[in-house]
Image (tube, grey):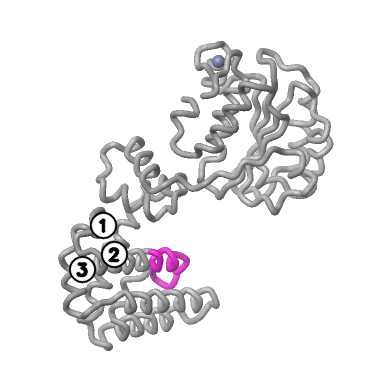
Amino acid sequence: MAFSELTGQLEAKERLGSSLLGEPGHAFLLIGPAGIGKKTLAREFAKGLICSAPTKDGGCGTCPNCIYMREHTHPDYRELLLSKGEKNIKVAEVRSKILADVGIMSQIADRKVYLIDADGLAEEGQNALLKTLEEPPKHVVFLLTVSDDSKLLPTVLSRTVSLRMVPNTEDEVFAILKKKNPDILDEEARLYARFSGGIVGYALDLMETTWLVDAWEDMMDLVLDLPNKSRMELLTHAYESFPQEKEKEHFPEYLTLMSMIFGELATLICDPKAPNLQGESKKDKMLTMISDHGLTIEKIDRCSRHLGEAMKAYRANGNYEILICRMLLALKRSI
Ligand SMILES: [Zn+2]
């Protein structure tokens, strides 16, 4: 594994790779939402920092340092991560695992590298680290990862080289999913990739379950059938296509799916032969709906606004059943 085997993140890889050829700084900060691949990239960079003969692409993969890193037994590399279920990394841990260790010379590599999940560092933990960040021993490099850099003290930020990670493209996420699971259907991988918004970790989580594929089918059937349903049917049955009240935290995800479906309808309005639709198998039905009901971009815009209003009502903790029924009636009227 090297930088070139990690998909996307070209700018961050370029900057980290270049720094391996010169004298890297003492503290780097990778910023990006959960699941975007901060730790994966930081670990790859750490291999390059620890390696005896790194290239711009990271560690050489064959020197003793690289072998110890691969086996997760390198004595000069440490990770300080948030344990499952914990809100913060304990300050005592910062002291014992980092501060008490940085002064000791490296054993095999020329450097010691510490990967720290800064999302777990409350102000006290950051303060404990600060002095070492300000005057790090020559042989030490810190790699911090954080999803929200506004939670870091300005003094911590100013001591680190920041790199902001960008979401992967849909095609990149698709390729990663196919590599992980070659048996997955293209249509499903495409749905996970599209739905994940470019967050690889989220797409991989989605791939572990089947709910999204089922929900997509349900929402597609619901939208296609909206014009044919009576008011009464919408008020009694359509509600059942959505998560039950006790699982209503998934409602926004269903709205996202509906919004994707209206997006595909808009695409087809503009170009009935548009390729690469998620709803390829329902394309004929979508085209029939467009022609039978004279769907226009204006109508789709109105529908999107109804989804937005439902989301607002949901966030404001409005009555769940009522907000769904109201949305469905409004959608029916606008179609
Ligand atoms: Zn090496």
Q: Secondary structure at mark 3?
A: helix
Q: Which three-letter amino acid code belongs to the residue tagged 3?
A: Met
Pointer 3 local density, CA inside 10 Å: few below 14, some 14–19, many at least 20: many
Q: Which three-letter amino acid code belongs to the residue tagged 1?
A: Leu
Q: Which residue is mark 2?
A: 267
Label the magenta part by its dominant secondary structure.
Answer: helix
Q: Which residue is mark 3?
A: 286
Residue at (56% x, 11% y) in the render? 64
Left or right, 263 with reference to 58: left
Q: Which mark is residue 203?
A: none
Q: Secondary structure at mark 1?
A: loop
Q: Which mark is residue 277?
A: 1
CA separation in Å, label 1 and label 3: 11 Å
Q: Quadrant of residue 232?
A: bottom left
Q: Which three-letter amino acid code belongs to the residue tagged 2?
A: Thr
Residue at (76% x, 39% y) in the render? 159
Name which of mark 2 and mark 1 comes first in the sequence.
2
Pointer 2 local density, CA inside 10 Å: few below 14, some 14–19, many at least 20: some
Q: Quadrant of ligand 1?
A: top right
Circles 2 and 1: CB distance less than 8 Å?
Answer: yes
Left or right, 91 with reference to 30: right
Q: Secondary structure at mark 2?
A: helix
Left or right, 247 with reference to 37: left
Residue at (52% x, 16% y) in the render? 60
Residue bounds of the magenta highlight: 243-256
Q: Decide which of 254, 46 is in the foreground and name it.
A: 46
Q: Is residue 219 above or below residue 20?
A: below
- Asked whether residue 201 is drawn in magenta, I would say no
Name which of mark 1 and mark 3 comes first in the sequence.
1
Q: Quadrant of residue 161?
A: top right
